Amino acid sequence: MLPILEFVLPEWSENDFAPLKQAENKMKEIGVGSGESSPRFHRACELLRKLASMRDIDGIQRQISDALHVRAYTFLLYSDEQFAKRVGVGAGFLSRIRSVREQMTKLSLLQLIRAYFNHFDSVCNGEELSAWSDFIQEQLAPQARSDGQTDLAVYAKQRGELFSPFAPFRLVKSARKQQIDFDGLIRRYHLGTFSGGVFLNRCQNIYYLETIRNLPVGEDDSVLHEVVKPQVCNSNYIPGKLLGLEILEILIDRSPQGEVSQAWQNAILSIAGDPRVPRSNPSYQKWWSLLGDQRVTKVRGWLSRFDLKLFLDVLEQSARDGKIDDMERMFKPRKAFMEGLLESGVVSESRLFLGNYAEHYLKKQYKKEELPAYAKVQSPQTSMIYLNLAGSVHMIEGSHSFRLKLLDKLPSNQKVRNYDVRTIDDSYLRSRLMSDYRREYGASEEALELTHDVHFNWQRKAIAYLKYRGVKVEPAKLIHPEQYRAFKQKVGAI
């Protein structure tokens, strides 16, 4: 049996706790001297801010000579956008950081990574971004051995994917390949705290583009309603190119030549507006001048179809609202004639002229940005449409007892194709245009005014004029199917 051991412990005196208190006070001093709330840290930040306001980049680099100023620099880099844009992350800064300590502290490294996700390519050029990305990868390499799921451990394991000038493209490509949605992408790479940063905006924009590239042609999708928002389409896709421009190129190039779906057309108009405006127009300069003449011509062809649809909607609705009984005479033959011109592929240009009634009606049916460019007619009721037919005939049709006009050329002072003219008198299109023509070119059969009648006279004369001017059309396409037999019996072959 073991003997009983007796311990006699003396009472603790104040002096016994002195070493412990000294150690505690020393730790507090270290914390106060180096933490983000410490006076030293605040003084370091203020000094770097002051040098940044003076654009003294060399001065800032000289100050980064100890761990405290490294921490202040990386803190300001991620938390102060103005500082980040003024100072950036050049090779000189990366070299100074490395000279202080080969391996950064975890706090300073996390701050540098936050700055990368917050600002990405908005605070440095391509060469600097590449050097910054490589530096972060190098600093993260030792952390890759960790099996944890902390942010730093995840960034270290995925450093090749996350830290590169091409990282947004790679991440989106990987996510689509694995069928991960955008929210899933954010969760996988622990990027949730950077939702307002440039890096995720780049990823999101590329995700939008990849979705649009893979949509069935003409299909509506929620992404089309997202990309037309100003903050999206006006953001950068790559340096020097807006995202909206890339979206426009995809939608225009993927659509067929003759027609575009309403959803895709609405997206195009919402971003860039109508190309049928003066070249000096800011919207034309921003978008259409960069898209090229071929795309502009293609869109103008689509808009001719849209113009005609809107004009016919207005024509039909005005007849209904006016309780005009003879709808056949007022609407059906003219609809068939103009749609036939479109189907024949001879309409190369168009322009709408809307009266008060038509403008009010269409604004109730469409959003403002979805409507094509049009001129305002100073009339409560009358609306007109201009069609350029194969570059050989200028045609103007209108509502409310408007006489169909066909001209081989327009007067030199014409306002029909002058996009600087946004408002026009009803009388100009009804009568003065023809008066100007005759005054300049003389009276001839090269310009016709035709009254719509139920005996096919206006269609016969119009078709004969078009063929005389070399515009290839088939009567069967220009006459309503229900009336074509009667037309042939009345008119015969043309």
Image: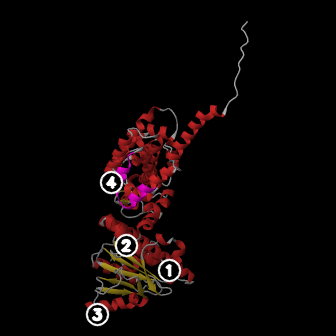
- The secondary structure type at the circle numbered 3 is helix
Disc 1 vs disc 3: which is toward the camera? 1
Question: Is the residue 93 above or below the residue 320 in the image?
Answer: above
Q: How far separated are the C-alphas under marks 4 and 2?
A: 40 Å
| Label ID, residue 439 | 3
The one nearer the camera, 36 or 189, is 36
Disc 2 vs disc 1: which is toward the camera? 2
- What segment carries the magenta color? 46-65
Quadrant where the C terminus sits is bottom left
| Type of amino acid at the residue the image marks with label 3 | Arg
The one nearer the camera, 477 or 237, is 237
- The secondary structure type at the circle numbered 1 is helix
Instruction: Answer whether residue 110 is magenta in the image.
Output: no
Disc 4 vs disc 2: which is toward the camera? 4
Disc 3 vs disc 2: which is toward the camera? 2
Q: Position of residue 217 (x, y in %)?
A: 43, 56
How busy is the neighbourhood of tag 3: few (under 14 within 10 Å), some, or many (20 plus)? few
In the rendered image, which residue does mark 4 sit on? 58
Instruction: Answer whether residue 63 is magenta in the image.
Output: yes
In the rendered image, which residue does mark 2 sit on? 282
How busy is the neighbourhood of tag 1: few (under 14 within 10 Å), some, or many (20 plus)? many
Left or right placement of residue 342 versus residue 313 in this view: left
Q: How far separated are the C-alphas under marks 3 and 2?
A: 36 Å
Quadrant where the N terminus sits is top right
How busy is the neighbourhood of tag 2: few (under 14 within 10 Å), some, or many (20 plus)? few
Q: How far separated are the C-alphas under marks 2 and 1?
A: 27 Å
- The secondary structure type at the circle numbered 2 is helix
| Colour basis | secondary structure
Counting residues from the start of the chain, the first of labels 1 and 3 encountered is: 1
The reply to whether the C-beta atoms of the residues labelled 4 and 2 are less than 8 Å apart is no
